[in-house]
């Protein structure tokens, strides 16, 4: 597992505890950690250099050195700088009045263009649009068929002039059909190509001339390393890209390449791909990507949501907890109720620092749907107050009774207990993560919504 | 803010040729410079940047450079760094062919790296060496994946065992293993669906494929090759680690080296996991796959460019 930047910085500043004042040397150590973390996240090394210089200026300018929580201050500066980099442009497609809107998909081999073509078609359909798709990939074996199958699954119209192997003719035919038959959007899939392949780049330019696209989406793999700026830069130079789609974000790549592409090439990110299925497409959100690059989860929105959702009563209860050793099944139930109010569980868990990539959590995520939460609540409700306060007394016969009482199976009860024990462990590690002076209190404060 | 990034942008606008020029500039005076230490430090920085820029990653880069500095010795820094990297690859050698037939080769990796294409190219390569080949289409998930592989099999003049879309991949693999034995093929190549190493259920599916094939052919799969796209960054190391632990990967295919990416993460992989690179992909044609040669790779993509 890659270590998160906030952890690392915490480490740097922790080692200095007790020193009266922080020195320039400390800032250097922190900057080194930032550099390491950004390189690990595949941010282009030149961007990293410039970025670190920039953060140094700010860190020395500001009150960081005198602050009580320099680590957090520095993380905040880094985060703000990154957000500034992405600008305020919202994700999605740029507004246009042109009809039909023509979207041209382009990028390297295997980046996800065809899959994204299908995803976009579905997304547009859900917005009440009528898209038409066409493949111009006459090179990759069965690429035309791939798009055809996907479109058929989605009930999306596909222009398929059988036997026509000229990419430009295929694109032109689709445009004519879109105009004549009243499709409001045409998505043109293209063959993957290298930015240094002049012949194929010329073919792309010809397709572009033929359909005069409103949107040119560069599809990039989130796992891309340092080469991202070169390929994206060259595609942009030759084709004038209007937006980037970052695919395969469902993996555990940090996606630092995206930061470089936006920073260096200057093209905004429009969408992210989060899986192989047609529904796995989301308009881009800068906050999420920045948190991911930094490996810290979207802490701020988590806190905000927790604040909004925690009712006063459970806040009071939590306030009385000194640490997580007396975190009981009752608290667990309160937490679950809170979580239900906070919104889709997947999103909430993704916001918890360090949780995004945890395997066990991914599995838990899968079997924790809202109905599941209701069942968990029923199980806990069937316990006696004593059992709720001390889960250690729950032997086999008690578990059987609880299962009967809540209309579930003993395995379900066992699973809930396991989840509870894991949550306690997780809370303890979170306490540890923010450790250092007062780490646990800070976390408790966070849970209390202060 | 804007001036900050326009600076970065300007810096990056330099073409590779210009960067190379700059590298030679800093290197050449180093030979005659009276204050050798200063010049040496400068070129060390350039090489560090080049390694990081090639996705070798900071930890492996620091390891390489400190090993070179510790070893000392004469000669140009770039040659000493090159020798160090070649040494790492020499320390990661593939398991020899046991002679078992059919030899089962399982091709795995994350989505879109070039698995199917590499299966086609490998079939062609083995056939040219006079070996008989059977292909198994175990990607029953992605749309038109079987059709794609069938085209490649046709190009290579090799037959393919396939099942319906959505079928259990392990059962196709079983059928293919039985056929390969019955038809006395030298090689059985298995193409699998792209899968992210973070997806536990898909990784378990890989495990099942391995178990099924080992029941039919003892000792199989003899090779499990992870296909890495040369453009991949530091996640390549995570992929290798996971696919090795769960999928029993024992070699790499590094594809798309015909682009500008160098696949340097394979150096970090060789350091940390001792995984050998078996083949490299250098284009979309059927002949664009060559057995890996550490000297060629290190010279062409690293040393000769410094
Ligand atoms: N330039 C170049 N392109 C390659 C190379 N190897 C594969 N490709 C291309 O990369 C794209 C993806 O290749 P596939 O073989 O379909 O990849 P895959 O890993 O089977 O993909 P999935 O099964 O979808 O996960 C295709 O367009 C190939 O033509 C290579 O060495 N160089
Ligand atoms: N996990 C994951 N896989 C994806 C995503 N987008 C595309 N893929 C997969 O990546 C591979 C290549 O995609 P494809 O659309 O054929 O790429 P193209 O060559 O650019 O058209 C396929 O196996 C897709 O299923 C994504 O967001 N997540
Ligand atoms: Mg495609
Ligand atoms: Mg494939």
Image (cartoon, rainbow, N blue to C red):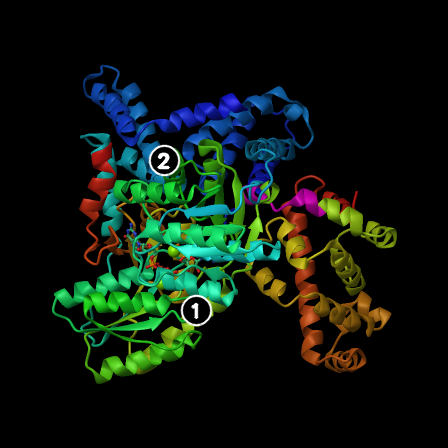
Rendered view: B301 above or below B201: above
Q: Kindly tell me whether mark 1's CB lies below 8 Å from ligand 2.
A: yes
- Give the SS element for disc 2: helix
Mark identifier at residue B141:
1
Q: Is residue B292 left or right of residue B52?
A: left
> Callout 1 environment at 10 Å: few (<14), some (14 to 19), or many (20+)?
some
Q: Is residue A238 magenta?
A: no
Q: Is residue B154 left or right of residue B264?
A: left
**Which of the 4 image quadrants contains residue A85?**
top right
Furthest residue to the bottom?
B182
The residue wearing badge 2 is A238
Q: Is residue B95 left or right of residue A299?
A: left
Mark identifier at residue A409:
none
Q: Which residues are magenta?
A: A289-302
Please provide percent x and percent y for residue B306: 24, 32
> Callout 2 environment at 10 Å: few (<14), some (14 to 19), or many (20+)?
few
Furthest residue to the top?
B34
């Amino acid at each position: 597992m890659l270590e998160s930047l906030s952890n690392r910085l915490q480490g740097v500043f922790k080692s200095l505890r007790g020193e009266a004042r922080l020195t320039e040397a400390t800032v250097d150590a922190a900057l080194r950690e930032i550099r390491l973390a950004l390189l690990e996240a595949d941010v282009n090394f030149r961007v990293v250099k410039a970025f670190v210089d920039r953060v140094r200026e700010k860190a020395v300018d500001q009150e960081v050195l005198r602050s009580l929580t320099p680590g957090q201050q520095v993380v905040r500066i880094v985060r703000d700088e990154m957000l500034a980099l992405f600008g305020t442009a919202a994700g999605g497609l740029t507004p246009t009045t042109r009809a039909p809107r023509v979207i041209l998909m382009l990028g390297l081999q295997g980046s996800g263009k065809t899959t994204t073509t299908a995803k976009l078609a579905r997304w547009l359909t859900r917005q009440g649009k009528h898209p038409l798709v066409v493949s111009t990939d006459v090179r990759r074996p069965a690429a035309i068929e791939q798009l055809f199958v996907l479109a058929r699954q989605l009930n999306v119209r596909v222009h398929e002039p059988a036997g026509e192997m000229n990419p430009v003719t295929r694109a032109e035919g689709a445009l004519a059909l879109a105009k004549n038959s009243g499709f409001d959007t045409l998505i043109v899939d293209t063959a993957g190509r290298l930015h240094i392949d002049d012949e194929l780049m010329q073919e792309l330019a010809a397709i572009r001339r033929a359909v005069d696209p409103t949107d040119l989406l560069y599809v990039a793999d989130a796992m891309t390393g340092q080469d991202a700026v070169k390929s994206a830069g060259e595609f942009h130079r030759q084709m004038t890209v209007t937006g980037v789609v970052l695919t395969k974000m469902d993996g555990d790549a940090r996606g630092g390449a995206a930061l470089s592409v936006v920073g260096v090439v200057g093209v905004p990110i429009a969408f992210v791909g989060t899986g192989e299925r047609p529904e796995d497409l989301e308009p881009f959100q800068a906050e999420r990507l920045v948190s991911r690059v930094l490996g810290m989860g979207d802490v701020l929105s988590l806190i905000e949501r927790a604040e909004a959702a925690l009712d006063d009563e459970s806040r009071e209860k939590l306030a009385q907890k000194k640490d997580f050793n007396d975190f009981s099944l009752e608290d667990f139930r309160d937490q679950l109720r809170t979580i239900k109010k906070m919104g889709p569980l997947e999103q909430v868990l993704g916001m918890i620092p360090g949780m995004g990539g945890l395997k066990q959590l991914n599995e838990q995520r899968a079997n924790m749907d809202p109905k599941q939460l209701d069942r968990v609540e029923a199980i806990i409700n069937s316990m006696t107050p004593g059992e709720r306060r001390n889960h250690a007394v729950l032997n086999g016969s008690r578990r059987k009774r609880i299962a009967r009482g809540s209309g579930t199976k003993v395995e379900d009860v066992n699973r809930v207990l396991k989840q509870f024990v894991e949550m306690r462990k997780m809370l303890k590690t979170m306490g540890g993560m923010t450790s250092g002076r007062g780490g646990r209190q800070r976390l408790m404060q966070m849970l209390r919504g202060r | 803010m804007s001036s900050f990034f326009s600076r970065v942008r300007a810096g990056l606008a330099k073409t590779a040729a210009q960067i190379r020029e700059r590298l030679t500039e800093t290197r050449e005076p180093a030979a005659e410079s009276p204050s050798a230490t200063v010049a040496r430090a400068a070129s060390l920085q350039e090489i560090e940047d080049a390694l990081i820029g090639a996705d070798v990653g900071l930890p492996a880069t620091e390891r390489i450079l400190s090993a070179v500095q510790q070893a000392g010795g004469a000669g140009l820094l770039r040659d000493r760094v090159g020798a160090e990297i070649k040494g790492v690859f020499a320390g990661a050698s593939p398991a020899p062919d046991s002679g078992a037939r059919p030899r089962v080769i399982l091709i795995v990796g994350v989505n879109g790296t070039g698995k199917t294409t590499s299966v086609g190219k490998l079939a062609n390569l083995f056939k040219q060496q006079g070996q008989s080949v059977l292909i198994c289409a175990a990607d029953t998930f992605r749309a038109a994946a079987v059709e794609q592989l069938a085209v490649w099999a046709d190009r290579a003049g090799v037959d393919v065992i396939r099942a319906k879309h959505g079928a259990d991949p392990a059962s196709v693999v079983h059928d293919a293993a039985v056929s390969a034995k019955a038809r006395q093929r030298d090689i059985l190549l298995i193409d699998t669906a792209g899968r992210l190493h973070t997806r536990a259920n898909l990784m378990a599916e890989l495990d099942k494929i391995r178990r099924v094939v080992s029941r039919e052919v003892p000792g199989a799969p003899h090779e499990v090759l992870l296909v890495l796209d040369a453009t991949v960054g530091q996640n390549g190391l995570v992929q290798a680690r996971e696919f090795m632990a769960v999928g029993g990967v024992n070699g790499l295919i590094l594809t798309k080296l015909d682009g500008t990416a160098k696949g340097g993460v394979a150096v970090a992989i060789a350091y940390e996991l001792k995984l050998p690179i078996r083949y490299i992909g250098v284009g979309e044609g059927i002949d664009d796959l060559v057995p890996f040669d550490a000297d060629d790779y290190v010279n062409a993509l690293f040393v000769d460019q410094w």
